[in-house]
């Protein structure tokens, strides 16, 4: 942890941010470990790429259905309590996976039902976790804090799948029980966060306050373009759902190979996130955003053609690095251009777009792979991601012209 956080000396002076970083790392690590076990276990049970897509679909629905409620909760109640409660729910879900595995009654449908519960908790957790940052660090440190927060996620994505793949050697239940413990640790870390400023004001809930996030986004072309760019790129270019297929059928590896493949994007992402924490982007930010998205799509195309584990990992590392650049820029643009009192609602809407793009993208990848093969699914997705980047440059010229991240509310 210290090697990552030390990229920003000022952040280490804020103990609440350190606690936040630990909570975010722990919850994401456990989530990634669980994803490896669930993916491999379902594929072993059914041998169906379509069922791998269903894993994404059942986690897609809570983000959409609960999106408006999430925003209200994040802006009206203590965000630390919301995050901590989500960890408890996810711990119980992981424990249910373990119990079902040990008892021998964990069917595909039971796994999807548990994922629906866990996905509901994650639907509340993700935007609330992001909305915590402005209340932990002073405004001058916000862009750097966002970049360093990315290292928490990427550290977890690197370590989580690798550890999950290794633990799977001792059985899926071992992975799930470990996830249960780590989610509990994340809850403890979240309880140590101390927020700056007064608690959120509980204004009456009206139609105006419910849809305030949507209204703000659609009135701000930069925020709208940044959010929808991620929506369509991840909807088309996501490859995560098909990694079990590539690991088992194309690269002919075991769970350890799947863990390495899932970790590879995070290796590239972590490297670039640490660099960004040292060297904040100063100029031509909009141009960098579109270049990174285009390179993201091209790396997916390389992965589609690869039949080598080493080349596949290299392509996925570039894939992850490009995605990390895009994430840091987009999140910074959204958070620096949104008032803190409505940040929860805006980020909830953002999560409805970005969160659903990943899970719905997994379903798209699985469905296309079931119909036309994994190669076609990944190839078409990579080409589509490049096309979206080129189209968005024309639809949202305001983004392409951005020179610096910081903007006015």
Image: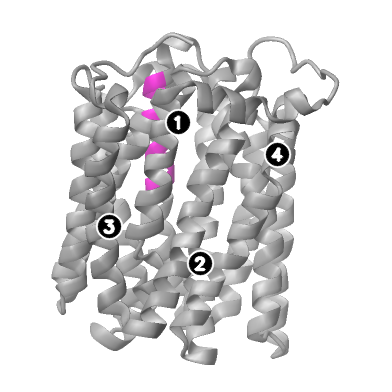
Report the side of 263 relative to 130 (left or right).
left
**Residue underneath mark 2:** 35
Q: Which residues are magenta?
A: 143-155
In space, the residues marked 1 and 2 are separated at their CA atoms by 30 Å
Tell which circle, 4 or 2, labels the residue nearer the N-terminal end.
2
* Main SS category, magenta section: helix
Q: Nearer the viewer, mark 3 or mark 2?
A: 3
**Residue underneath mark 3:** 384
User: Which element type, helix, strand or loop, lies under badge 2?
Assistant: helix
**Is 148 part of what is drawn in magenta?**
yes
Q: Residue at x 39, y 33 (%)?
A: 226
In space, the residues marked 4 and 2 are separated at their CA atoms by 26 Å
Picture quadrant where residue 341 is located: top right
In space, the residues marked 4 and 3 are separated at their CA atoms by 29 Å
Above or below for 41 versus 382: below
**Residue underneath mark 4:** 68
**Residue underneath mark 1:** 224
């Amino acid at each position: 942890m210290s090697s990552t956080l030390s990229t920003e000396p000022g952040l280490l002076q804020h103990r609440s941010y350190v606690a936040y970083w630990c909570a975010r790392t722990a919850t994401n690590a456990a989530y990634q470990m669980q994803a490896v076990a669930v993916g491999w276990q379902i594929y072993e049970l059914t041998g169906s790429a379509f069922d791998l897509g269903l894993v994404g679909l059942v986690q897609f629905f809570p983000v959409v259905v609960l999106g408006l409620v999430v925003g209200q909760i994040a802006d009206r109640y203590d965000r630390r309590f919301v995050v901590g409660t989500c960890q408890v729910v996810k711990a119980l879900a992981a424990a249910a996976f373990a119990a079902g595995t040990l008892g021998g009654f964990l069917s595909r449908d039971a796994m999807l039902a548990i994922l629906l519960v866990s996905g509901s908790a994650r639907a509340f957790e993700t935007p609330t976790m992001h909305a915590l940052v402005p209340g932990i660090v002073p405004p001058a440190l916000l862009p750097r804090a966002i970049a360093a927060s990315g290292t928490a996620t990427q550290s977890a994505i690197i370590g989580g799948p690798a550890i999950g793949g290794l633990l799977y050697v001792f059985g899926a239940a071992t992975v799930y029980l470990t996830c249960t413990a780590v989610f509990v640790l994340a809850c403890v870390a979240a309880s140590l966060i101390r927020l700056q400023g007064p608690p959120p004001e509980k204004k009456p809930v009206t139609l105006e306050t419910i849809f305030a996030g949507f209204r703000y986004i659609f009135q701000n072309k930069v925020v709208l373009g940044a959010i929808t760019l991620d929506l369509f790129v991840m909807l088309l270019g996501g490859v995560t759902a098909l990694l079990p297929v590539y690991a088992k059928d194309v690269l002919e590896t075991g769970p350890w190979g799947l863990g390495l493949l899932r970790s590879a994007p995070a290796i590239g992402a972590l490297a670039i996130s640490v660099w960004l924490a040292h060297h904040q982007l100063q100029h031509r930010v909009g141009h960098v955003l579109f270049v990174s998205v285009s390179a993201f799509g091209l790396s997916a195309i390389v992965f589609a053609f690869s039949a080598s584990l080493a080349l596949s990992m290299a392509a996925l590392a570039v894939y992850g690095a490009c995605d990390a650049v895009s994430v840091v820029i987009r999140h910074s643009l959204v958070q620096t251009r949104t008032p803190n009192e409505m940040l929860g609602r805006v980020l909830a809407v953002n999560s409805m777009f970005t969160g659903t793009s990943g899970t719905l993208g997994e379903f798209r990848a699985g469905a296309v792979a079931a119909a036309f093969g994994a190669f076609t699914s990944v190839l078409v997705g990579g080409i589509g991601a490049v096309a979206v980047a080129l189209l968005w440059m024309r639809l949202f010229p305001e983004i392409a012209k951005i020179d610096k991240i910081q903007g006015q509310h």
